Image (spheres, grey):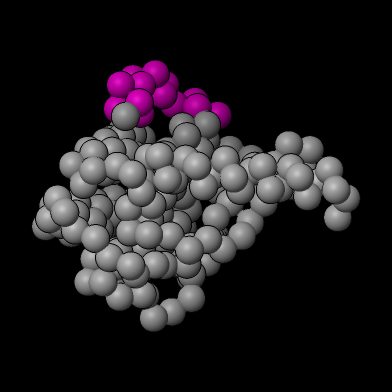
């Protein structure tokens, strides 16, 4: 790796860490609840607005369909909830980081209403877990998490970061919003008028 490429990667990691510290680690419990609730609600509202007849169609050959996006979110947020519960219990999650790009065995065979229902239930459980956190809660427990960041002039950068519980929570929000934006691009390419969901998609 050239010195220039190494510098770009270091800058990308530093930018991500600064964001997580500002929006996560140094945030109050109340702020975290508001931020993640807005992010999850925006995602859920948009997915609910998509015509079911389009969800298994791909806008481009190398892009996930809306069903595959929702499937990935469900398969990722379920173990994310388990890890969050570990952190809130003051213990490190016992397994390694959740893999990036996680999907079920056959995402396109899952009924769309079922996907939306179970994703909503999972998000409800995340909200419930955070609702029970005292305002002064603190723990030294950390969780490893696969971070992905765009690097100018190169492929996305992937690394494992040790996160405190507040930073972990804000990454859940970022993950939801990243895939909300992905879903909007796919839906627009399939002819969906995404402007009607603009208010829901801007938490």
Against 68, residue 174 (above or below) is above
Of residues 32 and 72, which is closer to you in this image?
32
Of residues 47 and 176, which is closer to you in this image?
176
Q: What is the span of residues highlighted in magenta in the rendered image?
A: 188-202
Against 179, residue 79 (above or below) is below
Image side of residue 164 versus residue 136, left or right: right
Q: Residue furthest right?
A: 2
Taking the magenta stretch, the answer to whether it contains residue 18 is: no
Give the residue displayed 67% in from the left and 42% down from the top.
11
**If the image is split into quadrants, where does the N terminus sit?**
bottom right
Instruction: Give percent across and percent down for residue 102.
Output: 50, 63
Give the residue displayed 63% in from the left and 56% down from the top.
158
Give the residue displayed 43% in from the left and 79% down from the top.
95
Taking the magenta stretch, the answer to whether it contains residue 198 is: yes
**Looking at the image, can residue 71 be seen?**
no
Instruction: Give percent across and percent down for residue 65.
Output: 51, 46
Give the residue displayed 54% in from the left and 44% down from the top.
16
Image side of residue 56 versus residue 90, left or right: right
Instruction: Give percent across and percent down for residue 163.
Output: 43, 60
Image side of residue 169 versus residue 55, left or right: left
Against 91, residue 14 (above or below) is above
Of residues 117 and 177, which is closer to you in this image?
177
Q: Report the magenta stretch's main SS.
A: loop
**If the image is split into quadrants, where does the C terminus sit?**
top left
């Amino acid at each position: 790796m050239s010195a220039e490429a190494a510098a770009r990667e270091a800058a990308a990691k530093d930018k991500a860490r600064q964001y997580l510290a500002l929006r996560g680690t140094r945030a109050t419990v109340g702020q975290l609840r508001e931020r993640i609730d807005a992010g999850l609600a925006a995602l859920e509202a948009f997915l609910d607005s998509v015509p079911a007849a389009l969800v298994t169609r791909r806008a481009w050959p190398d892009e996930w369909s809306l069903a595959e996006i929702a499937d990935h979110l469900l398969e990722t947020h379920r173990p994310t909830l388990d890890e969050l519960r570990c952190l809130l219990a003051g213990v490190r999650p016992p397994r390694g980081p959740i893999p990036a790009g996680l999907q079920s065995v056959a995402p396109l065979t899952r009924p769309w209403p079922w996907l939306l229902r179970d994703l909503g239930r999972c998000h409800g459980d995340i909200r419930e877990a955070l609702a029970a956190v005292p305002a002064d809660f603190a723990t030294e427990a950390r969780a490893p998490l696969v971070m992905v960041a765009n690097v100018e002039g190169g492929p996305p950068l992937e690394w494992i970061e040790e996160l405190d519980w507040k930073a972990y929570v804000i990454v859940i929000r970022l993950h939801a919003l990243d895939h909300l934006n992905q879903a909007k691009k796919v839906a627009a390419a399939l002819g969906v008028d995404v402007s009607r969901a603009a208010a829901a998609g801007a938490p």
